[in-house]
Image: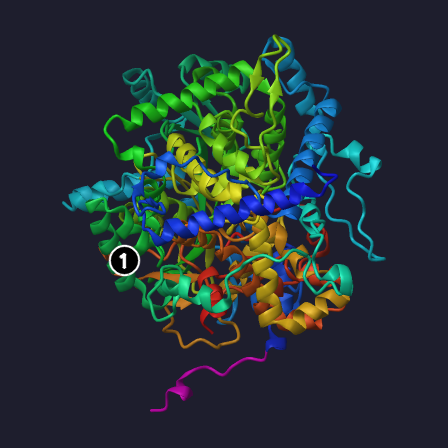
Amino acid sequence: MDKKDDRPERRAVSSIKFRSYLHNTIYDVCKSRGWKETDADLDWDLHWADLQWMRDVFDHVRLEDHQRVNHFRNNYELTRKDLTIKNLKRMKKTLEKEDKLQEAAKFDFFPQTYVLPAEYGLFEVDYKRNPQQAWIMKPIGKAQGKGIFLFTRISQISDWKKDHKWRQEGQQAETYVVQRYIENPHLVASKKYDLRLYALVTSYSPLTVWLHRGGFCRFSHHRFSMNLKEIDNSYIHLTNTSIQKTSNKYTNSGCKWGIRRLRQFLISTYGEEATNTLFGEMQQVVLRSLQSVQKIMINDKHCFELYGFDVLVDDRLKPWLIEVNCAPSFSAETPADYHMKFNLFEDILNILDFERKNTGTEERVGGFDLIWKNGPVGLAKGDKYLTSYLGCMNEKAIPISKMKQPPRLAASQANERVLI
Amino acid sequence: MDELGCSLKLKNCIRELEESAERRGSINGSNPEIVTAQGKGVDASAVPNIPKLTESHHAISEGRAKWRSHILTELQGISSDLGIPFARHRTATTEQARQNREAVLPSETLPPPAERSDGTETDVTNTKQKVFTRNRPPVTARSMLKNICDIRSANHISNTTKLYGWGLIQVELQIPTPDELTEIFNELNPSNRQCGVDEQILKEKFTDDCIRQMSALLAKNDKTAIRQRLKRGAPVCLRQAIWKLILDPTSNEASGNEKRRAHLEALQQDVLKVELLTDDVLRKDIRECADDEKYFVFDDALEKVLLPLSRDVYCTPYATKAVDAIKGFGRGSPNEVLPAYPPSGIIPADGLARLCAPLCFIFTNLVDVYFVLRAMYCRYWSKLYTISSSPSTMLTLCKLFEKLVHIYNPDVAYHCITAGIRPLEIAFPWMFSAFSGYLEVDQLLHLWDRVIAYDNLLLFPILAAAIFLWRGKSILLCDSYNEIRHLFTDFSKIQVIPLLQYLLFA
């Protein structure tokens, strides 16, 4: 049979409608493809929705086959800090019960975490056993590093307890997670950094995961030190861009490196094998986190989601999961940032294939590599040279010179040249 | 003697003596035995040393002297602008003064090359600009280029014919011909497998072979074999070991590490004790280097390495070949003379920090970075700041560049001249900074691999000419000076090895 007849008809580009609550890179990409913007309730092909819409409207509407929305209904199972940990711990226990001890042991990429106020007792026991350990406190509902602080003495948080009217009953209390602080992060020129990886999930059943080759590292501008006197210096310990921007050492060069440059740096300084292992493990961190929520996510053929994984590497070159973001920012601060996010979104739209150009058997679309489709895809694990395409060159990216920057960025003074 | 016009004649005589002695030496082999009229051999050491001129070409030595006095005036200017002496001991008050200066200075940077509308160049010594460039480096690309172009030989043919030719360099120098270049750089031939271009085509098998061969050579510690193999490039993961072996042999000795660390620490102690004027200039340079998105992470490391480097006396014989030593006189006794200021003789140039930053991509240990930087400066980078007729220094590099552009792309060269800009004006900053702030780091390191392997800088003008060749069509479409300048701002797509091969072998 002629294969062409099986494929659905191609759609005219101008017939595709999109609705987006954001007017940034997303809007630019859709417009550049010739799509039409709409704010109709249901007459769209792609809806880049905010979480509010998902909570309020999604359950009550019936969508057509071709319509896609950018979130899963219960994505908080993966992205809320306390639920991420709960699901990972549960996955580990399940594997141990099934006697798959080796598999279970690999779920060691998240630091010991307790949810407060519920697990305060357990936390206290652990604290007393390790009095030298530093801990980090994070509110579960906030982003951009707000409300995060470090401490070494439990009295420091009992002070906070008083200030925030925290009640032990757990009613209307602001939930926090307290985690073992990773005191030995990998440093580049004595500076701490963390990585942002992008993973696109187009379905949870079967689990289909695409991992983006690019991504970036955010650096702190200050020398890292575990000196107790500097434990509350956010500039040293927290690498969020929003915090580092306010530092007096922040210059026009920004604070980011593309992951490709980091990979080259690591190959130069640690060698091929160690770097390969590290990036392969990072890919596994992403996969295992997604596998841990696979069974409880409400799958819907209309849903897809782009996750931003924050990963920290320690000085033994082991990756740790910090958190997962369900709505990674698409606003660009510099032209290079815009270039990267434009390519990222363009690739997402190519994977979703509204224009019906794909054959369905692709393993690489733009900067995305298919790493899991009901089973591992792509590079065989244990390959000597390449365990992951993460950090490899993306030659299919639209070059920055061919991209028209929005007016506010065209005049930017930033020195960032290229993040891909 | 000058009045009698004899000084030039004397220099010519000395030059002839030199050349004939060299010729005799080469005929009799490596051990020159002077044969007297009676046919008896005489030990060479009995013959007095031949006086060697640093610079035998009269016009160039004048240019050299002018360059040196320019630098000296710049240093004195900086000293008076900032209000600090050339050197003094650090105390609490001086530290406070330094912090006050640093709080004010970040906003002052060198103005970019002025966009010319009427074809005249703005004078850098314009007083208005002086106010805003208090902390300018004494050695900048623009000032060096200006000095080089001002060198005019008294007997150059242009004095009579008034035909100045297309090039900016108005002295005749001996430079290799394209055929000679092809021979020298024969290892870069496309028929040989190269790191830097063949990894993408041949992928894993090639990298694996490369790594295996290099590791075997490293295990044998065979410097010449490794250098020969390095002409085809180095695999990224082994670069650290290879560069250390070639440039810094003491690192492999047993007690070597201790001695090296002690040496660096002693220099760092010296930094803490004495404050030099050049420290300020270097700090400013580091801050500008940190503005580059590739190198901003390394600003702390750069400070720890560059400031001690300016005090390391090891570099003095090499650095003073570039610029004759500026002697310092202490305020104490009149006999207190510093043989060179700053102690290493390295006058901070614009972009010195950028020569060090790529090394931080290879070595994590600061001691390694320091010693490799020192070796590279002494062997290669000091030549970039030298005005001299010896091969591989800046003048010959510039001359070679111009010649290559004129041979391979005469229409482009002519078009540029009619638009009001010479190709050398665009390419000079690239060569001056060893391409460091321009190329992507991995490409830059491939280029520097070859520089170390071939032990000369001829690759810089070849690469610059190749870039011109590559952009040739686009240049012909440009109309104005600004457009041409704009064409060359983006280096992200440039792949070094294919370009070099294109020029040399195509």
What stretch of residues is rendered in magenta? A1-12
Does A34 sit above or below residue B399? below
The amino acid at mark 1 is: Cys
| Left or right: A51, with B363 as reference point | right
Q: Is residue A393 magenta?
A: no
The residue indicated by pointer 1 is B210
The quadrant the N terminus of chain B occupies is: top right
Foreground pick, A283 / B128: B128
Relative image position of residue B91 (x, y in whole percent):
59, 9
Q: Which residue: 53% across, 14% down?
A: B273
Badge 1: chain ID: B
Quarter of the figure with residue B41:
top left
Relative image position of residue B345 (x, y in whole percent):
54, 30
Where disc 1 sits, the SS reads helix
Foreground pick, A375 / B504: B504
Q: Which residue: 24% across, 43% down?
A: A106
Foreground pick, B258 / A349: B258
Relative image position of residue A311 (x, y in whole percent):
40, 42
Q: Is residue A307 visible?
A: no
| Left or right: B135, with A317 as reference point | right
Does A11 sit above or below residue B257? below
